Amino acid sequence: MFSKVGSILVVGGGIAGIQACLDLADSGYFVYLVEKSAFIGGKIAQLDKTYPVNDCPFCIRYNEHMECASHTNIEILTLSEVRDIKGSSGNFEVTIAQHPGYVDIEKCTVCGLCAERCPEEVNDEFNEGLGKRKAIYLEYPKAVPNGYVIDRKNCLHFTKEGCNICLEVCNEKAIDFDKNEKDITLNVGSVILATGFDSVVPSYCEYIKFPNVITGMEFERIMSLNGPCGGHLIRPSDRKEPKNIAWLQCIGSRDIKHNYCSTVCCMYAVKQAILAKKHNKILNTSIFFMDMRVCGKDYERYYNRAKDEDDVRFVRSRVHNVFPVDGTDDLLIRYADERGKISEEIYDMVVLSLGLEPSQDAVKLARGLGISLDKNNFVETSSFAPVNTSVPGVYACGAFNAPKDISESITEASAAACASSLNMAASGAALHDPLEETGQKPVPAGLVVGGGVTGMVSCLCLADQGYRAYLIEKTDKLGGHALKLRKTFKGEDVSSYVKELINKVENHHLIDVCLNSEVKNTDGYAGNFSTRVAISSSTETKNIKHGVTIMSTGADFLRTSEYLYGKNPNVLSWFQLDKMLSEEPNTIKNANAWVFILCVGSREPERPYCSKICCSSALRNALELKKLNPDMEIYVLYRDMRTYGLIEDLYTDARDKGIVFIRYKLDGKPEVDEDQDGRLKVRILDNLLGEHIIIQPDFITLQTAIVPGNHESLAKLFKLPLDQDGFFREAHKKFKPVEFSAKGIYLAGLVHCPKPIDETISQAQAAAVKAVTVLSKEYIATSNEVASIDLKLCVACLTCARICSYDAIVINGMGKPYVEPAKCRGCGICVVECPTKAIILEHFKNDPILRSVDEAFLEPFTEYVQ
Amino acid sequence: MIVGQQKDFDEIKKMITGYNRLLVLGCQTCVAISFAGGMREVEILASMIRMDRKMAGQDVEIVEEAILRQCDFEFLDSVKDLVADCDVVLSLACGVGVQAMAERYPDKVILPGLNTTFMGLTEEMGVWSERCAGCGDCILDRTGGLCPIARCSKGLLNGPCGGSVNGKCEISPDVDCVWQLIIDRLKALNQLEKLEEIFPVKDWSVSGHGGTRKIIREDLTA
């Protein structure tokens, strides 16, 4: 489809690597995907289900795996390792060692005879050692590339010399034991590291040796239908159904060696408990945790559901130890609750929620490249360039940057694709050669709605790749809420970053900034939109033609009246404190006591989500106050301390500096009063003491919730769905975080859900690269699977036009319906509803479908429905 | 348009008892639009009959067809052969279509599969409501374009009555009081004075009370 000019190397064939490959390949670059194992897909195929949707991840991603394998712009190198990378940005020379799999994939028909006859049985890594496989194997039936491989270190041909059984039984003559390791040299312009994570049981967990203590991933395999237990929830020692299961959180996270939070474990334990209950309704499930860190879109709701509907028990404690119960395979758990009371409970099975570490091979590779890593060996990145490593031209995404879940890894993968394609554009690598025009060209421009950091980053990504960007901002200046922010959790200066960003946007010759502007209406389809924008200072409107749209209208913050806010001048919002810290630190320096109240308006019944940024912003400001005046008493009143990922550092630092943390519950909120002189008084139940305490602070800072902006009218205009909290609803919560189900429209930043600036920026980049996959096409792609109407049968009842979810059917001047092929998504609803049966969906006509139904049933089905 | 509603399946079953060769004939105009008698409903109904007969261990042969309008003789001729081959025609047209078929094919039994319900419109997908009662003497000029004969439960000409509560009719809180709507609309049009005019006794002779109606246009007849 495209020429091979300008190639990029992606290291790691997990979900992030595959996503980066597809985005780059669809933007016109040639990509090499290097994967050390025999199959791509990474850990995702091992997961039984994903939170918070409980979908089968592999079923949903299988298309992407296949697309990656068949894309003309992608070359997959499995069983391959990067030995060396030399050179610099724009011109890297990469040496790769490719180990032989001894099976010719072109010839292998996946008949399975070789594995059936292979005499050597070994532990199956795909099933975490809980099952067996042969020395010649296919990881799982739909593994990509779809062909068997020989595992040399276990194959009897190599270990014992002489076994040739598979060679003899293979009808296709696909097996060749004489293959050797191959050295491959590639020249690439950019490198993306998507090497994922390892999960290692820490040495203090000696109890992992008990048979019924298993890891989270082992539990996934046990529950999985294609796992070693066939989807029956049984425990390893005696294959009996457990009656109670305990999950132990923070194993290998938030300890002395790993002073970070692995981010994903809380949610996966909650998910596993919910799903385990589906296997066995009377099962007792207990999750032993320190803080429940469920900060992502709809995660809080999922957690509430586990507590309230699925009856999952949550025990706030860190488990000391696990002991065997004599004479049984059961396990005794000893733990201390919040008040320090020691309790013991017996469980049939214990699941360790193992943390995430960077993969060791990746660390070695990164060190060799001279990439700066942090003390935990994660890639050091800036919040403002979240996928850039310290080496120009080398990008990193996913769990190598910090522990993160699937949707953020996918977002970062797209962001890394965006950053590396910008790098390629800058280093002069040409995109695809123009093909002969065989259709309508996409309009080479993007409309970006919302001029905050997100919108500006997206605009720059588009403009730096040569596309025009129209930035629509309703206020009179760019920058949005970021203008109020001072620092990121890493301490980087936000205001100077925003200033520089505004400067770049305003001076870019391909960016048209429309201030005081509002979208009035919009129409069209991916590649060809037309939008009318009104500028408040004039009566004229502007008509903009564009190929893609990015929604980046941000969010708002809650105006609260709780805790005397607005009544007592010393009760501040977080951004008021930010302002004071930068403009008048001396006025607050001499305060004796300061209280931070977290979750103001968040995680409440009417707003059941976490605002994600409040914990880190409170801690950063608290530490800053401590620096101004080390004698200041600082109290942080919180519900769960959600310093996920690398933010955990702030929490450790804050405790070291003597900041006091007091946990409160939703039904025991702190009470704030003032005396007649306006002096503040906070009364709160201290869980450690079991008694109420009173604090008399000089100031109180409220970490108020992030609330969705007023999106209803925009949502209606663009025909985009909102979720139940009022944020925009993306196409898929897990796998399509920056896309809408309508093609050509993308979302990024706080319109999606609350998130910090680094995640906002990677979403902005991800949305831009998705946009480029549309803009870079030679002509607007239309699917063949579109509805077509037989006008002889049509009676113009308008049903199809009324029910089409994508507005693909319009009534033309003849009073008859017309299907706009580029807008039609081939959903088939109109076909089913047409009262005169005048509509067919190409490729899904009645006859062939009914014929195949006939073949499926022994007696002809058409006898009933002709 | 004419809005129809398919009869209960049990009623249809009873009607076709004893007939083994059926022509289920749809009409692709008004009743297709109201999802009662178009090709789609023909196919669904025919499948239901086949399944029902199969379960009862009885044979049936069904031909499915739909024509553009069953109320025009010319269109009826196109199914001449199909009609000849069947024992009975189950028509999914409105009452006009069923009668047209009976008139065109005097030797054949023609059965109605629908109840012809009213003259109305599609409010939204799946919702139809009555708008016109065909009274033969239109008064919409005086009622803000909303018909009290078709839409007032009592057919009042000088409404509203005392049963209008919060804009709803006393028969059900789901039914709008059309007189409330008339007043609202006249007010918006600045024509509220029209409400002051008292309607005299209406001539119902043209509404069918004076016998079957027929129109003959000398200028158009041969």
Image: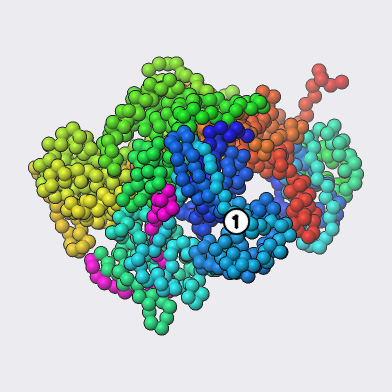
Q: Quadrant of residue A725?
A: top left
Vertical arrangement, residue B23 with respect to residue A285, above or below: above
Which residue is at a point 43% across and 36% down the rendered structure image? Answer: A88
Q: Return the chain for callout 1.
A: A
* Residue span colored magenta: A339-365
Of A346 and A147, nearer the camera is: A147
The x, y position of residue B101, in whole percent, is 83, 39
* Residue on which the image places disc 1: A101
The x, y position of residue A159, in whole percent, is 57, 67
Q: Is residue B96 left or right of residue A520?
A: right
Which residue is at a point 19% across and 54% down the rendered structure image? Answer: A656
Vertical arrangement, residue A463 with respect to residue A54, above or below: above
Vertical arrangement, residue B17 with respect to residue A611, above or below: below
Q: Is residue A166 left or right of residue A360?
A: right
The x, y position of residue A865, in whole percent, is 76, 51
Magenta stretch: residue A344 in it?
yes
The x, y position of residue B220, in whole percent, is 81, 20
